[in-house]
Amino acid sequence: MTEPTLFSGFSLTCVRCDAGEDIDTEAQAVALGWINVMLDDTLGPDEWFWTHTGLCPDSQVEDPTSILR
């Protein structure tokens, strides 16, 4: 029997701020201007609070020279 995870499916957070919890799919994120949306496998299964990270449009405006662009 596997342990339940905190989230199932798609969940997103910005690498620079806490934006993203209102986005339901990667396609929606890209359509809203998010970039570098990728699977976040840096935390163990018991630690996940999101499945994906990316850079939101507001954070892109704050640092247009970001290496994440």
Image (spheres, rainbow, N blue to C red):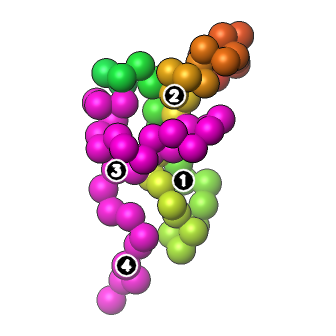
Q: Is residue 5 among what the camera can see? A: yes
Q: Quadrant of the N terminus?
A: bottom left
User: Which comes sooner in the sequence, label 3 or label 4?
Assistant: 4
- The alpha-carbon separation of the residues under discs 2 and 1 comes to 19 Å
User: Which comes sooner in the sequence, label 3 or label 2?
Assistant: 3
Tell me residue 53's x, y (percent): 52, 41
* Res 69 → quadrant: top right
| Element at label 4 | loop
User: Which comes sooner in the sequence, label 3 or label 1?
Assistant: 3
Residue at which label 1 appears: 41
Q: Is residue 45 above or below residue 67?
A: below
Residue at which label 3 appears: 10
Badge 2, how many Cα within 10 Å: few under 14, some, many 20+?
many
Q: Is residue 9 above or below residue 37?
A: below
Could you tell me the amino acid type at mark 4?
Answer: Pro
| Element at label 3 | loop
- The alpha-carbon separation of the residues under discs 3 and 1 comes to 13 Å
The answer to whether 67 appears left or right of 41 in the picture is right
| Residue mark closest to the camera, 4 vs 2 | 2
User: Which comes sooner in the sequence, label 4 or label 2?
Assistant: 4
Residue at which label 4 appears: 4
Residue under the image location 51 percent in, 28 percent down: 56
| Residue mark closest to the camera, 4 vs 1 | 4
Could you tell me the amino acid type at mark 1?
Answer: Asp
| Residue mark closest to the camera, 2 vs 1 | 2
Residue 56: mark: 2
- The alpha-carbon separation of the residues under discs 4 and 1 comes to 17 Å
Q: Is residue 26 above or below residue 40?
A: above
Q: Which residues make up the magenta segment?
A: 1-29
Residue under the image location 50 percent in, 21 percent down: 57
